[in-house]
Image (cartoon, helix red, strand yellow):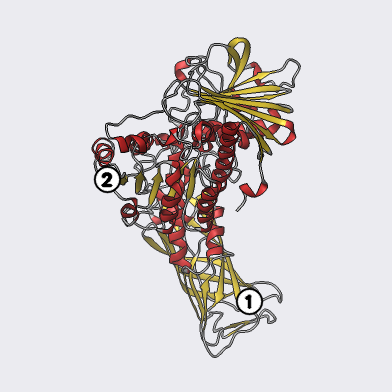
Amino acid sequence: MACFGNIRMNDQNPLPDSNRRGFLKTTSLATLMTLMGGVELRADEQTNSAPAADAGLTKQPPPPNVNFGVIGLNEWGREILHELSLMQVSGTYFAPVVAICDNYPHALRKAGNEDAPKAKQYADYKDLLADPNVQAVVIATPTGTHREIALAAIAAGKHVYCEAPLANTIDDAKAIATAARDAVKIVFQAGLQERSHPQRNFLVPFIRGGALGTNALARAQWHEFTSWRRDSPNDQRAKDLNWRLSQKSSTGLIGEAGVHLVDVASWFLRGLPTAVTGFSSLVFWKDGRDVPDTEQAVYEFPGGVNYMFDATLCSSFDDVYEVYYGTDSTIMVRDSKAWQFKEAGSPLGGWEVYARKDTFYKESGIMLVAGGSHQTALVGDAASTKPYDNTPLYYSLQSFAKNVGQVSQTVKDFIDLYGDTDPKALQDKITALKLDPAATWQDGLEATVMAIKGNEAAVKHQRITFEKEWFEL
Amino acid sequence: MKYFALVFGTLLTASLITASAQTSYSSSPSGSDVKIDGTSSLHDWEMEGSLIGGFFELGAGAQLDPAQTGVTGVQDNKVPAKAHIIIPVRGIHSKADHMPDTMDRLMQEALKSSDFPRIEFTLKELTFKGPHAVGKPFDFDVTGDLSIAGKTNSTTFPVTIESLDAGKLKISGTAPVKMTDYGVTPPAPNFGLGLMKVGKDVKIIFEWTVHKR
């Protein structure tokens, strides 16, 4: 359920050419890290963004107006409400929140008053699902409750955005994935928001196109100095809020935070891991919790590529980032930026000469920028660079809203024209749609399995071999 | 950027059709395709969809037999037939790799899709252009009322009708449309490279598969 970073890709949605021209686009130095150097990798802002106001639209054309209900109103649920409100301000996609739900009255009132004043408030998610005004729901409740709510939402015919990990057991994750797969008329999106981010979608074909040379290894970290504990004057509420701190209800740091990064690694490396070995310890936050505050895992991917992930609540040093190492170059991804560090003697495309380079200690990194069909050129003015201003969550929710709009319209048109008797033909129509990149039920299942088993390996200090059927329905 | 719908009716039936009673066909959920081809000051463009609804009906006495060179039941080359075609505007999407969303919304705005979500065509006259080459589709001209963005004009364009297996027909044609005739102002979006002026003439190219009821 945690989030950060940004990245994503969908094989069904052709990505912009990782044409070398694209990398010449301007980039900003203003916020670059200061210690190594590289070419920043950045996608064309319009690649995955909403229709631009400057495209000549004389008025707002009918937007895919999708009425949202948000279930679970703690920190992350509130963040979701905030991002949805930004979508309306931007005027690109309209996703009005018409209903909110939390079983804790204070949280419900607070979110209603501050974030969604027009939304109808429900204490029971079943009542929200019964509201015919709600078309799509976002499930931002504790991981262990996802199964019950997601299955009920799908059964109610609601489009579902379910936070990741999907569940804290493989059986629960499979139950959700199965229901999502079988529900032809609804959009199910796993909350792996990096998969909707333009930068990540740009990087995938770039990396898969051979930019690294031979993949050697990969590494990522998630570092924060924070207790992860939530306070409440109400003892029961405090217990409910701190579900992450108990192994009975939590998938730990690898599950709740690492799921997004492990998912990206699998996506970039184009495969599922065969095994994971983990380590963990509770070194600082000894406040009664049994969830480690520091975890490490090594995932073994095909081709001998090992992916090392570590997470801690005991140090914020260097925050969150990923590095993919290859024989020709290494690519580092931080937030919504990426840099390429080329090996001496590796093949050159010529474009690197013009690319912006940043220095990171002793290394020089090329800032990678995608170009799409636009003219892109090196511009030295940092202020002119407009990286992805929105959060990964924003892009992810935007993809969800847009995809729900498209799929809903297609379903309605199909039934109007042909009746509701040919689900196979309807599925074909939906599959043919050019949807925004977003994590599918399959992405969600695979990432959840990787996260659950990674956490289990860390807690038990074991090596766990992934069984193929864990990833399959 | 206009589209439209086409319709015409008539036609044929697979190998033989009863001449004594009318034969009705419904749209099949699979096997249909509609494309809108247009031009602009920058480059040609294309949009595509696969949702075509409506019905087709051959009147009593009319028969299309792929083995014959003529059409039974024709008088002065006119085939008794009815047809109504429906194309949902929002079911047509840009094939562009870049900013397809914007292209879709430009089209939807131009066609006033909120008020007029469908392009429709109602067949008025089906004219056999014969003779029919055995084994080939039948050639016709269709005349009917084409409604786009809330405005209706009479139009004529050629179609072919081909018998498929299982009592299905494929009705294919290309309808030229001048957007301004339908009160549609060709979009002139600014994509950052200057103004792109969309040409007012477009072609609607369709393949409509119907099955016997």
Res. A165 visible in picture: yes
Would you place residue A175 above or below residue A393 in this image? Answer: below
| Disc 2 residue type (three-letter) | Ala
Image quarter of the N terminus of chain A: top left
Task: Please identify, in this view, whether the residue under mark 2 or under mark 1 is nearer the observer.
Answer: 2
Secondary structure found at label 1: loop
Secondary structure found at label 2: loop
| Disc 1 residue type (three-letter) | Ala
Does B18 sit left or right of A176 as displayed? right
- Residue B151 occupies quadrant: bottom left
- Residue B113 occupies quadrant: bottom left
Quick one: which residue is furthest to the bottom in this view?
B20
Q: Residue at x 47, y 20 (%)?
A: A284
Depth check, front residue: A377 or B186: A377
Res. A90 visible in picture: no
Q: Position of residue B157 (x, y in %)?
A: 53, 65
Name the chain under label 1: B
Q: Residues within 10 Å of mark 1 (few under 14, many from 20)?
A: few
Q: Position of residue A46 (x, y in %)?
A: 49, 34
Q: Residues within 10 Å of mark 2 (few under 14, many from 20)?
A: some
Q: Residue at x 47, y 29 (%)?
A: A4
Q: Position of residue A397 (x, y in %)?
A: 43, 40
Residue A218 is labelled as none
Would you place residue B24 above or below residue B176 in this image? Answer: below
Does A64 sit left or right of A309 as displayed? left
Q: Residue at x 67, y 47 (%)?
A: A468
Quick one: which residue is furthest to the right in this view?
A345
Depth check, front residue: A414 or A289: A289
Q: Position of residue B98 (x, y in %)?
A: 54, 39
Quick one: which residue is furthest to the top in this view?
A362
Residue denoted by label 2: A119
Residue denoted by label 1: B166
